[in-house]
Image (cartoon, rainbow, N blue to C red):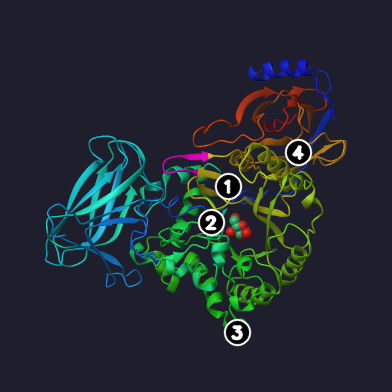
Amino acid sequence: MKKHSYFKHLCLGALLTAGMNWASTAQAEHIMKIDTRRMGASVQPTMYGLFFEDINFAADGGLYAELVKNRSFEFPQSLMGWTVQGNVEVRTDGPFDRCPHYVRLTDPLHYERRTGLVNEGFFGIGIAEGEDYRFSVWAKAPQGNAAIRVQLINPTSQKEQQEFTNDTIRINSAEWHRYELLIHAPLTERHAQLRIYLVGSETADLEHISLFPKATYNNRENGLRRDIVETLRDLHPGVMRFPGGCIVEGTNLQNRYQWKKTLGPVENRPLNRNRWESCFDYRSYPDYFQSCGLGYYEYFLLCEDIGAEPLPVMNVGMACQFQNWDNAYAHAPLESLQSYIDDCLDLIEFANGPADSQWGRVRADMGHPEPFHLKMIGVGNEQWGQFYFDRIPAFVKAIRARYPDIKIVGSSGPDSEGKMFDAGWKEMKRLGVDLVDEHFYRPEDWFLNSGLRYDSYDRRGPKVFAGEYACHGKGKKWNHYGTSILEAAFMTGMERNADIVHIAAYAPLLAHVDGWQWRPDLIWFDNLDVVRTTSYYVQQLFSNNRGTHVLSLTMDNRIVAGQEGQDSLFASAVADKNRGEVIIKVVNTGSYPQDITLQLQGLRGALPVDVTRLTHSGMDDENTIANQHLIEPTTSHLVTIGESKHSTLNDSVPAKSLTVYRIKMIRP
Ligand code: AHR
């Protein structure tokens, strides 16, 4: 390991801070040659994507902006999430056949008592001062008239009143109707609750009690949290895989994800168990269900909103293999796969079919007559072994026959290498799927040593979808800066091999700070705030600088992937043909800064360079709700040295850093 001259770097640091060009003629030790004259493989627009799964309260309680938990009283314990007082009766002959429960509030017949109920929200209800909230309820008054009071409260308030809003709704019909109220928030409260109680002595029936911020993303009524969608959008994702993950499979086939049940009016979408609810004894959330208010239509809209290609993952007639191991009976018998196959074919029609086709009409009726332009479909989540190999061929055959242009994504299972992984790849090649979804949650040394992973991949078979990955620190399985830098190092290898790696997505995507089951995650949030982790910034730096074509980058004629003698450096280069720029990413995973010279073959003159750097000295640090901006990339500007043969740039890359150089390609 090269020892570093501190004096030199102090000077360099000062110059960089001042945004000046360091025009030293001294040759740095590490000369990286970037050949800008020959464009290599195309970088797919899908290259950096998202993987969304409803884990860690990512959907209900997270991205889906509904603030009321168990709004339709469909949880197995009908009043879970609600505290009741007085005469509250749960009834089951409501107006929505697939969500039949509702509550009847009757007079307690005692002047001091009240009948009402309070919803606790998802770890409270986040209310922001100055924002408007849309309260709605389906209600009827059996005697023709009734009234309810609707309040937002702070139950632990030290003020005179717990309530900070107070409204009344008059129910004036014995038939079910939807009533709505706009509530203006006078203050900010992270853990508010919603209180509703009967006013007067007339009975009221209430169903589907809902509260949304008015300002959802694109102001949709059944909308998504604006701040979270903006955070996703800022990643410029090329693709979004959804809805999972293991929830596609379910603990058993009964609670697998069934997209058809997630369409139509939200009031009548049946509740589903969330497979993550009690998956881990040590992080158990018995109140974690899927309302499916964020359903397939909303997923497609989200993809459209953030400019990501949709990549739905379909159940392949298998329940979660982790939860069922060798149990053949957990899966659909081979002769009963047709309805699962139909789900795939119908989904393609739902997304792309004309508005007068059976499923295209459903889409059109929901408000989107234009197709969603689906191009890919995943068959099976993280499947492996014979159960999978027995089932997937029928799906591939049927999809190919009806939709030959749709790309099919198969799985190589949960391992990053080894017997199971090899068997998966072999079978996927034999079947001729278009992409193979690889998953790897691996420790530091794996990421450090996998810089060359894709350089030796067979170029003749399916392409790679690195569909779920993250560096899980040994003994530190939570977000911290040190692992993010290793992810960056690994990603240079994916980028260099963009001819075979067509999509990559960090996983999981979202986590509620009060309701997570799995760490690390890309984005954390609470009821009011969103935190971009350092892994988020790594993803963003790659995604926003993905370029269009791979360029050759070598050091001593070798690929730069932390190899022997490379002083822990990793690097890759791409050209952005549209913007006329060269983009170089250099990662230093070592403990010392490294002097580098970027030699831009084919370019001459003094060229302007944007240098964006993610660097931090505390390896265990991370952005948090309390300290959201602790570690963020910063940008400065340099100019290359226009030497006679080619432009060069000298720089010092700090220890444990990712640097992105964007250089204008001005040809001699
Ligand atoms: O991302 C969390 C889980 O990891 C996914 O649900 C599953 O596909 C993988 O095992």
The type of residue carrying mark 3 is: Glu
Give the mark nearer the N terminus: 2 vs 1: 2
According to the picture, the residue beneath numbered tag 4 turns out to be 571
Is 529 part of what is drawn in magenta?
yes
Q: Residue 335 bears which disc, if any?
A: 3
Q: Secondary structure at mark 1?
A: loop
Q: Quadrant of ligand 1?
A: bottom right
C-alpha span from label 3 to label 2: 29 Å
Q: Secondary structure at mark 3?
A: helix
* SS at mark 4 in the image: strand
Asked if labels 4 and 1 touch by Cβ distance under 8 angstroms, the answer is no
Is 196 positioned to the left or the right of 393 in the image?
left
* Residue 563 position within the rendered picture, expressed as x and y whole percent measured from the top left: 84, 41
**Amino acid of disc 4:** Ala
- Please name which of the two marks, 4 or 3, marks the residue nearer to the observer: 3
Q: Quadrant of residue 462?
A: bottom right
Mark 4 or 3, nearer chain start: 3
Q: Nearer the viewer, mark 1 or mark 4?
A: 1
Q: Earlier in the sequence, mark 4 or mark 2?
A: 2
- Disc 1 marks a residue whose amino acid type is Asp
Residue of label 2: 53
